[in-house]
Image (tube, rainbow, N blue to C red):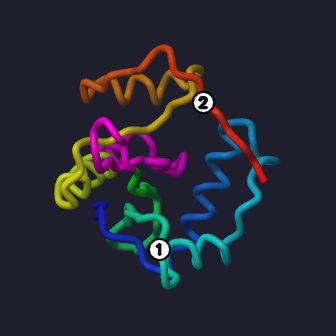
Amino acid sequence: MISIRPGELTDVPDAFALVTELAVYERAADQVSNTVEQMALDGFGPNPLYGLLVAEESESKKIVGMALYYFRYSTWKGKRLYLEDIIVTEEYRGYGIGKLLLDATVETARETHCTGMMWQVLDWNEPAIGFYQQFGTRFDNGWTNCHLDF
């Protein structure tokens, strides 16, 4: 049995382990510069920058998945929820946990009066693309991601 709940400060080490697992899967482990300590401060400090939902295996209380999101503002659409990542640990994939996390994130967006949600998916990640297609997701063309790192 899996339950979805808001993340807590004590969940940050498990959430960071999931982030690391995702980075390895995406062939980018060397690009992770965040830390457990920084993630704790950024999500649970005096000015939280993100929200966290966790998927918890009810009997063992093990964190097996997470959704990390934050709010952004569109001059065209207003308040939007940006889903940074949904991550389900490999051992628990294929059991509907990703759907539970996405449904809970959609509900969070609605409860906080967002006009919609957005996120990104790597163009080679066919399992994720297929997962998102089942929800009627619109995939944008013509936009290029831009980054300025400091």
Q: CA distance from mark 2 to mark 1?
A: 25 Å
Q: What are the residue bounds of the magenta stretch?
A: 73-100
Kindly state the secondary structure of the residue where label 2 is placed. loop
Q: Earlier in the sequence, mark 2 or mark 1?
A: 1
Q: Nearer the viewer, residue 6 or 112?
A: 112
Point out residue 105 in the picture as x, y percentages from the top left corner.
30, 52
Assign the C terminus to one quadrant of the image: bottom right
Whether the magenta-drawn stretch holds residue 131 is answered as no
The residue tagged 1 is 48
Mark 1 belongs to which amino acid? Pro
Q: As rendered, which of 23 and 94 lies closer to the eye? A: 23
Q: Amino acid at mark 2?
A: Asn
Number of numbered tags placed on the structure image: 2
The residue at the far top in this view is: 142
Please tell me whether residue 2 is drawn above or below residue 129 in the rendered image.
below
Q: Which residue is outermost to the front?
A: 75
The residue carrying mark 2 is 145
| Residue 92 percent coordinates (x, y) | 45, 49
For label 1, the SS is loop
Q: Residue at x 37, y 63 (%)?
A: 53
